[in-house]
Structure formats: C-alpha cells, structure tokens
Image (cartoon, helix red, strand yellow):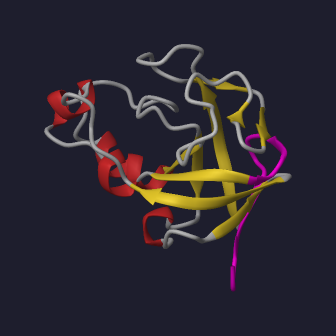
C-alpha cells in the first residue's frame, strides 16, 4: 500500500518546509497556509522517500522531510513514472499531476553538498481536483483511466 510519510509547509518562499500534523488542500489554491499556494499548475509538490533514500548515503547534511521543498513525502508509489494528467487520491483529496521535476534554484544547498538533487528529475507537481485533509499514514491510490 502506498502511503503519505510526511506533510510539510513553509509560510515564506525561499525557506525550508517543515512537517505539520495535517494539511488542508483547497481547489484553485493548493495547501492552505503554504507560501507556494495559489491558482497555478504547481499547487502541491510530492517526493518519494525512495528518491530521498538514494541521497541519504551521499549527504553530509540530514535529509529530513521538507528539505527538498516538497509538500508531501510518499512511500510505495513511483512518482517519477506517473505521466502528466495522472490522478491520484491522497487521503481525502484528489490531485492531478501537472509537471514532473523542476529546475533546481541556483544550485540548492543539497546540490552544493552532494553534487546533485533529486527534485529536478524525481519530484512531481499537482493541482487539487478534490479538496480534503491529508495526514501522515494516509493511503495513496493512483487512479487509472483519467
């Protein structure tokens, strides 16, 4: 079973995200209280724990949830293989994948320390298509035929 490991937000852009007990996802907005929320195509970012694990052995700094500026850490779903347009349920909410990866901002601290960053190739972005609450431990289901 695929599941949510951590949910993370930041109140200001340019700062690390930090884990919170739950997040509220809102249509045309994203995560209530997150600095990157808004009516655009990257409302929610997701990164697999499996991707972070590939970096943990190389990094001299701790790779805690939110360090890659991801909103949702997952386990048991290969996010980077989901095509744009894929729908997935995450807790009570439903998301639609809008982008795979993104450019690393000015060589982030992790890229400087380790030589590479996983978010540009393995992180995904989505928009909210059904509102709801998401908490660590919630199930993730990839929906077919969307």
Residue drawn at x 30%, y 24% as measured from the top left: 61
Work out whether residue 60 or residue 71 is closer to the camera in this orientation and state it: 71
Which quarter of the rendered picture does the N terminus lie within?
bottom right
Boundaries of the magenta span: 129-146
Residue 58 lies in quadrant: top left
Work out whether residue 5 or residue 10 is closer to the camera in this orientation and state it: 10
Residue drawn at x 52%, y 32% as measured from the top left: 65
Residue drawn at x 57%, y 70% as measured from the top left: 85
In the rendered view, tell whether residue 60 sits above or below residue 48: above
> Outermost residue, bottom direction?
145
Q: Is residue 103 left or right of residue 88?
A: left
Residue drawn at x 31%, y 56% as measured from the top left: 121
In the rendered view, tell whether residue 12 sits above or below residue 115: above
Q: Position of residue 114 (x, y in %)?
A: 18, 35
In the rendered view, tell whether residue 108 sits above or below residue 130: above
Q: Position of residue 51 (x, y in %)?
A: 40, 53
Work out whether residue 41 or residue 112 is closer to the camera in this orientation and state it: 41
Q: Position of residue 89 (x, y in %)?
A: 75, 62
In the rendered view, tell whether residue 52 sits above or below residue 61: below
Q: Is residue 103 left or right of residue 40?
A: left
Residue 109 lies in quadrant: top left
136 in magenta: yes
Q: Position of residue 36 (x, y in %)?
A: 55, 29
29 in magenta: no
């Amino acid at each position: 079973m695929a599941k949510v490991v951590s949910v993370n937000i930041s109140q200001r852009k340019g700062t690390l995200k930090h884990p919170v007990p739950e997040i509220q996802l809102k249509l045309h907005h994203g995560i209530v209280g997150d600095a990157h929320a808004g009516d655009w195509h990257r409302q929610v970012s997701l990164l697999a724990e499996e991707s972070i694990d590939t970096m943990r052995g190389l990094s001299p700094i701790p790779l805690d949830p939110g360090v890659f500026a991801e909103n949702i850490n997952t386990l048991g779903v290969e996010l980077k293989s989901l095509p744009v347009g894929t729908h997935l349920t995450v807790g009570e909410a439903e998301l639609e994948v809008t982008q795979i990866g993104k450019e690393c901002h000015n060589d982030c601290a992790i890229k400087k320390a380790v030589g590479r960053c996983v978010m540009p190739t393995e992180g995904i972005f989505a928009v909210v298509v059904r509102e709801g609450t998401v908490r660590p431990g919630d199930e993730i289901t990839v929906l077919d035929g969307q």
